[in-house]
Image (tube, rainbow, N blue to C red):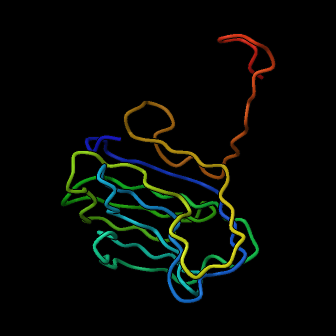
Amino acid sequence: FSRNLTAVTVGFAVYLNNLPTANAFMLGSFASSGGFQWFSVNINTVGGIQTYTETWNGGTFIEESGPVITPGGWYFVEMQVVHDAVVGSYIIKVNNKTILSKTNVDTVPSSAQFIIDSAGSAVIDIKAPFYIDDIYCTNSSNSVNTGFLGDVRVYTLPPHGDTLSAGWT
């Protein structure tokens, strides 16, 4: 995704067997094309959601919620970041409820590209299993599906015939 896009939204289902015991579990991050994590969303040790900028550089804490995630259940998490160095913003939802949101945040990385770096990675101090499912990503460059889609299911559609464009079910 180019940083010229207005907004990028990522959604996915997540299941954690345990909460992290000492550090945060990174739900997802947005990064520069050089791989420097610029904005990240984490689960803390009590099940709250945390946001950071400049994650690659030790991180600048922005804010956190109270507990919203408990072990042993599926949650649908959605993260939307509007790219701007002065009036950037983000909205974090869990099960279609806004948990955190903020405006006037520098959400633009220092390079020319802004990419989805990860979803459910950088696991520190968490015991397996954890699962990620039903991932979607939208951006503001289209006229449809440009924002939050809600709790969606992503199905694999394998071909049922040996054809180029037909035979998909």
Nearer to me, 89 or 52: 52
Residue 74 screen position, x and y as percent: 72, 65
Residue 58 lies, with reference to residue 83, above or below; the image says below
106 vs 40, nearest the viewer: 40
- Residue at figure coordinates x 49%, y 32% from the top left: 144
Rendered view: 137 above or below 61: above
Q: Reply above or below: 31 against 49.
A: above
Where in the figure is residue 40, as x and y percent of width and height? Answer: 41, 66
Q: Is residue 160 left or right of residue 37?
A: right
Q: Quadrant of the C terminus?
A: top right
Q: Quadrant of residue 12?
A: bottom right
Total label count?
0
Estimate the x, y position of residue 105 in percent, counting from the top left: 26, 66
Q: Is residue 111 left or right of residue 159?
A: left
Residue found 43% across the figure and 30% down from its top = 143
Residue at 65%, 58% (x, y): give it: 132
Across and down, in percent, residue 152 comes to: 67, 47
For the N terminus, give its image quadrant.
top left
63 with respect to 144 (left or right): left
Q: Quadrant of residue 164?
A: top right
